[in-house]
C-alpha cells in the first residue's frame, strides 16, 4: 500500500510529495521489504527536499480557506468539549482486535464483509467520543481519539481492496481464493472523491524484470526485460 509517486516523489496531487513506505504504491509489489524504511526515507527525502524547493520558486502562496480551517479545528477539539459519550479506550482495542482477526492471514469474503460492517458501526461512534483529560498538551487520550478516524479510513481501504483482489498473492492470503491468478498482476488504486470511495486498477509495469507468460507465483523463474 501507499501513494503512487514518480521518480521525483511527486503524487498526482500538485504540491504533495511522499517518501518512505508511504510512497510504496507499486514499488514493493505484493510484499513489504523489511528494514528498507530508513534507507527509503533518507534517499527519497533528499530528492523531495531538492524537488520541492525548485517547484515553489515561481509559485505564490495559496489562499487560505478560513471556513475550512475553522471546520477542521472544531472537529478536532470537539472530543475535548464533550462531557459524556464513548471513551476511546472502549473502542480502539476491540476495533484493532477485530481487524487482526478478519484481515490478517486467512482472509475470506465473509470475514471481510463483516469487518466492513463493523467499520461502519465504529464510524457512527466518532461523533460521540469524549476525552476525560481536557488538557491540550501532551494528551495521549486526545491523540488516540484523533487517530481513530484515520485508523477507520485506512482499515476501510484495506478491506475494500482485499475484497476486490480475488486471489492470493504475497501477504494477501485469501482462503476462498488460495491460488495466484496471473490476471491479477495489477495494482489496485483507491481514493476518496466527492465523499465516495472509488477503486480502479492499472497493470503492473515491468521496467527491469518481467515474469514469463502465465507466471503468477513469485517463486517461479522470471526473465530480464529485453530492449
Image (spheres, rainbow, N blue to C red):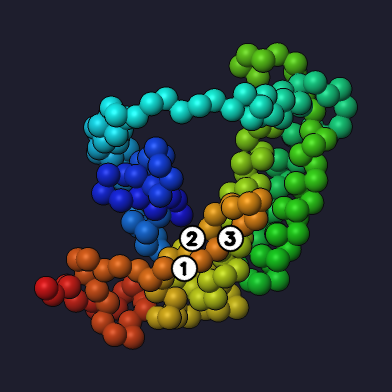
Rendered view: 72 above or below 15: above
Where residue 217 sits in the image (x, y, percent)?
36, 77
Residue 165 relative to residue 77: left or right: left
Rendered view: 98 above or below 68: below
Q: Residue at x 60, y 68 (%)?
A: 163
Quadrant hosting residue 158: bottom right
Q: How packed is label 1: few (under 14 Cα within 10 Å), some, or many (20 or more)? A: few
- The disc label shown at residue 11, or none: none
Residue 77 relative to residue 28: left or right: right
Where residue 115 sits in the image (x, y, percent)?
70, 59
Question: Which mark is first along the chain, 3 or 2?
Answer: 2
Spatial CA distance of label 2 from label 3 is 8 Å
From the image, tell me which residue sits under label 2. 189
Residue 98 relative to residue 192: left or right: right
Name the secondary structure under disc 1: strand
Quadrant hosting residue 43: top left
Cβ–Cβ under 8 Å for marks 2 and 1: yes
Cβ–Cβ under 8 Å for marks 3 and 1: no
Q: Residue at x 26, y 82 (%)?
A: 212
From the image, tell me which residue sits under label 1. 201
Name the secondary structure under disc 3: strand
Rendered view: 83 above or below 217: above
Residue most toward the right?
84
In which quadrant of the rendered image does the C terminus lie? bottom left
Spatial CA distance of label 2 from label 1 is 6 Å
Q: How packed is label 2: few (under 14 Cα within 10 Å), some, or many (20 or more)? A: some
From the image, tell me which residue sits under label 3. 198
Residue 206 vs residue 65, the one in the foreground: 65
Amino acid at each position: 500500500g501507499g501513494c503512487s509517486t514518480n521518480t521525483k516523489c511527486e503524487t498526482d496531487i500538485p504540491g504533495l510529495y511522499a517518501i518512505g513506505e508511504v510512497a510504496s504504491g507499486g514499488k514493493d509489489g505484493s510484499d513489504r521489504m523489511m528494514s528498507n524504511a530508513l534507507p527509503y526515507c533518507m534517499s527519497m527525502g533528499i530528492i523531495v527536499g531538492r524537488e520541492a524547493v525548485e517547484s515553489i520558486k515561481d509559485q505564490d502562496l495559496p489562499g487560505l480557506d478560513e471556513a475550512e480551517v475553522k471546520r477542521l479545528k472544531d472537529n478536532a477539539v470537539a472530543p475535548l468539549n464533550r462531557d459524556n459519550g464513548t471513551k476511546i479506550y472502549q473502542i480502539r482495542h476491540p476495533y484493532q482486535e477485530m481487524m487482526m482477526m478478519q484481515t490478517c492471514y486467512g482472509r475470506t469474503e465473509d470475514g471481510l464483509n463483516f469487518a466492513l460492517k463493523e467499520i461502519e458501526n465504529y464510524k457512527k461512534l466518532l461523533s460521540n467520543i469524549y476525552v476525560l483529560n481536557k488538557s491540550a498538551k501532551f494528551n495521549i487520550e486526545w491523540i488516540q481519539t484523533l487517530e481513530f478516524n484515520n485508523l477507520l479510513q485506512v482499515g476501510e481501504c484495506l478491506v475494500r481492496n482485499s475484497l476486490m483482489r480475488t486471489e492470493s498473492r504475497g501477504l494477501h492470503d485469501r482462503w476462498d481464493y488460495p491460488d495466484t491468478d496471473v490476471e491479477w498482476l495489477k495494482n489496485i488504486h483507491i481514493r476518496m472523491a466527492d465523499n465516495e470511495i472509488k477503486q480502479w486498477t492499472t497493470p503492473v509495469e515491468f521496467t527491469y524484470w518481467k515474469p514469463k507468460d502465465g507466471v503468477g507465483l513469485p517463486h517461479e523463474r522470471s526473465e530480464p526485460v529485453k530492449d
